[in-house]
Amino acid sequence: MKNSQNFINQNYLTYVHYNSPKTKEKRSLLRAFWVGGVICCIGQGFRYLLEFGLGLKGDELSGFVSMIMIFLGSLLTGLGVYDRIGKYAGGGSIVPITGFANSVVSPAMEFKTEGYIYGLAAKMFVIAGPIIVFGVASSVLVGLIYFVGYLIF
């Protein structure tokens, strides 16, 4: 019985080996490297624009660059462009902050036909997790309160 099971497993593994598409690892690694690098260079470009153009420094600069990159990742996901980038680049597209935005927006878009509450709002938490989404939402709220307080006083 044990020999027949090993024979079946070996036949299956042989079948899978010959019929699976061959991966081109070097090409995949190169694509992931350059696309991830381009995404990071875009973020660095925004950093330089905000630092030297608007004079932002420190935490303000980091926060604005993060917001811009998250917005761009969300926008590109909504337009269907980020999925094509991810298909081409693989892991190179999920490592930067734009990959985080994609992981939040994708499930929400997939289930938007179920309505705003059960589809869009609830499914947004599927991949990224409620802690991350609540953390970002609460930080935006605290930032707005701080900004309004700064304007008033």
Image: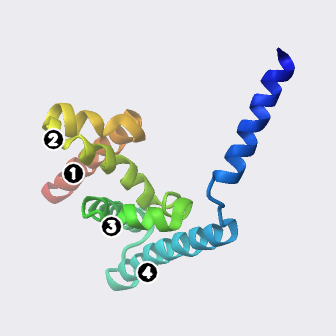
Q: CA gap, disc 1 to disc 3?
A: 30 Å
Helix, strand or loop at mark 1: helix
In percent of width and height, residue 124 lies at 30, 40
| Dot 4 amino acid type | Gly
Residue at which label 1 appears:
144
| Dot 2 amino acid type | Thr
Q: Earlier in the sequence, mark 4 or mark 2?
A: 4
Helix, strand or loop at mark 2: helix
The answer to whether residue 66 of the structure is visible from this angle is no
Helix, strand or loop at mark 4: helix
- Residue under the image location 71 percent in, 37 percent down: 12
Residue 146 lies, with reference to residue 66, above or below; the image says above
Contact flag, marks 4 and 3 (Cβ < 8 Å):
no
Q: CA gap, disc 2 to disc 3?
A: 20 Å
- Looking at the image, is mark 4 or mark 2 nearer the viewer? 2
Q: How is the image coloured?
A: rainbow
Residue that protrudes farthest toward the right in the picture: 3
- Give left or right: position of 54 versus 131: left
Residue 31 lies, with reference to residue 83, above or below; the image says below
Residue at which label 2 appears:
113
Q: Earlier in the sequence, mark 2 or mark 3?
A: 3
Task: Name the quadrant containing residue 110.
Answer: top left
- Give left or right: position of 148 versus 3: left
The answer to whether residue 125 of the structure is visible from this angle is yes
In percent of width and height, residue 20 lies at 63, 52
| Label disc, if present, on residue 81 of the rendered structure | 3
Can you say which quadrant of the picture contains the C terminus? bottom left
In percent of width and height, residue 68 lies at 33, 66
Residue at which label 4 appears:
45
| Dot 3 amino acid type | Val
